[in-house]
Amino acid sequence: MKRISGLIISILLTFSAQVFAWDDGVTHPLITEIAIDNSGLDSYLKDVLNFDFGTETEIEGVDAENKVFLILPK
């Protein structure tokens, strides 16, 4: 009986119309923000690397080939 109910649940989950998954629009940015807040990255960028705005510093690259970047304060 356990095998049959497990099989039925597996089939229902596999073919369900609504899929619950992590997305790159909401979940990933939220996880990243929480990780940054808990890591001390902001103070490291400000104190050690002298980025005036810490994690809020915008970095724009000329192109990926030359790896030349310009630090733009907000």
Image: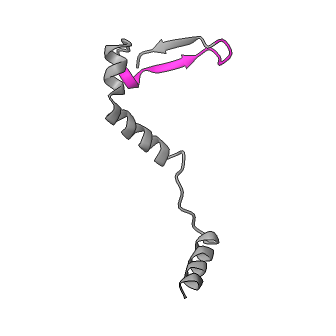
One can see residue 53 in this view: no
**Numbered range of the magenta stretch:** 53-66
Q: Nearer the viewer, residue 8 or 49?
A: 8
Q: Is residue 51 above or below residue 18?
A: above
Residue 21 position within the rendered picture, expressed as x and y whole percent measured from the top left: 54, 57
Q: Is residue 21 above or below residue 74?
A: below
Q: Nearer the viewer, residue 1 or 59?
A: 1
Image quadrant occupied by the C terminus: top left
Image quadrant occupied by the N terminus: bottom right
Name the residue located 38 percent from the left edge and 33 percent from the top edge. 36
Residue at the far bottom in the pictured view: 1
Residue 59 position within the rendered picture, expressed as x and y whole percent measured from the top left: 50, 19
Q: How many marks?
A: 0
Relative to residue 71, is residue 37 drawn left or right? Answer: left
Relative to residue 16, is residue 36 drawn left or right? Answer: left
Residue 20 position within the rendered picture, expressed as x and y whole percent measured from the top left: 53, 61
Q: Quadrant of residue 12?
A: bottom right
Relative to residue 55, is residue 70 drawn left or right? Answer: right
Colour mode?
Answer: one colour
Q: Is residue 25 above or below residue 70?
A: below
Q: Quadrant of residue 32?
A: top left
Q: Quadrant of residue 42?
A: top left
One can see residue 15 in this view: yes
Q: Is residue 21 above or below residue 31?
A: below
Residue at the far right in the pictured view: 65
Name the residue located 32 percent from the left edge and 36 percent from the top edge. 38
Name the residue located 57 percent from the left edge and 63 percent from the top edge. 19
Name the residue located 59 percent from the left edge and 11 percent from the top edge. 68
Q: Is residue 46 magenta?
A: no
Residue 41 position within the rendered picture, expressed as x and y whole percent measured from the top left: 36, 26
Q: Nearer the viewer, residue 4 or 61?
A: 4
